[in-house]
Amino acid sequence: MTTLQLGDQAPDFRLPGVDNQQHALDDYATRSVLVVIFSCNHCPYVRAWEDRMVQLQRDFAQQNVQFIVISSNSAEVRPADSFPKMQERAVEKGFNFPYLYDEPQTVARAYGATRTPEVFVFDDQRTLRYHGAIDDNYDDPAAVKQEYLRDALKAIIAHATPAVSDTPVVGCSIKWKP
């Protein structure tokens, strides 16, 4: 499996959301920037970054940025990542973005995602402009020195190249089906 490279186009998807609606890449065609984050419920790295994900969506919604969060983890391997548990988590954390379930794991494979959380940011042409981590400190929001995702979003909105376009992904491995 190869991870998308900067300059690649966003692979299409059609997935069920915790809102019981189907969501497809084309549903967000009018958005200036699309942030796709592979995530899950159980991972301590995800849990540490969730509030920041919600805040970033809130901060950039007025600039026509849309976050899409996708769980591709096998519920057979990690029952805490089942669709009903995803629905509970979305309500509990007040998710302000679609939270989608990639049960067949085809979307994770198409993007080459390997970790949770793993961020892919696409511009208005759905060209990959940033890949990596949310920031440089999952554990302590007060100790963050580099806000990779926030800085990338500001650059892309300004039609500029992010100063940092690719960072190491920090998180749990995607739990593949046996």
Image (tube, rainbow, N blue to C red):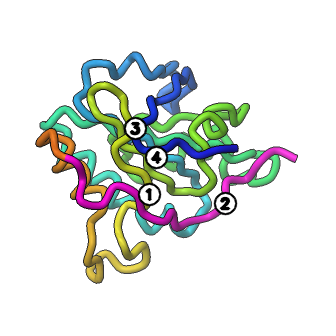
Q: Which residues are magenta?
A: 161-178
Q: Tell me the CA gap for discs 3 and 4.
A: 17 Å
Q: SS at mark 4?
A: strand
Q: Tell me the CA gap for discs 4 and 2.
A: 14 Å
* Residue that badge 3 annotates: 7
Q: SS at mark 1?
A: strand
Question: Is residue 15 among the parts visible in the rendering?
Answer: yes
Point out the tag, 1 or 2, that comes first from the N-terminus.
1
- Image-quadrant location for residue 51: bottom left
Three-letter residue code for mark 2: Ser
Q: Tell me the CA gap for discs 2 and 3.
A: 24 Å
Q: Which mark is residue 132?
A: 1
Q: Nearer the viewer, mark 3 or mark 4?
A: 3
* Residue that badge 4 annotates: 37
Q: Tell me the CA gap for discs 1 and 2.
A: 14 Å
- Rendering coords of residue 166 (x, y %): 40, 57
Give the residue displayed 59% in from the left and 63% down from the top: 43
Three-letter residue code for mark 1: Gly
Point out the tag, 4 or 2, that comes first from the N-terminus.
4
The answer to whether residue 106 is above or below residue 35 is: above
Point out the tag, 1 or 3, that comes first from the N-terminus.
3
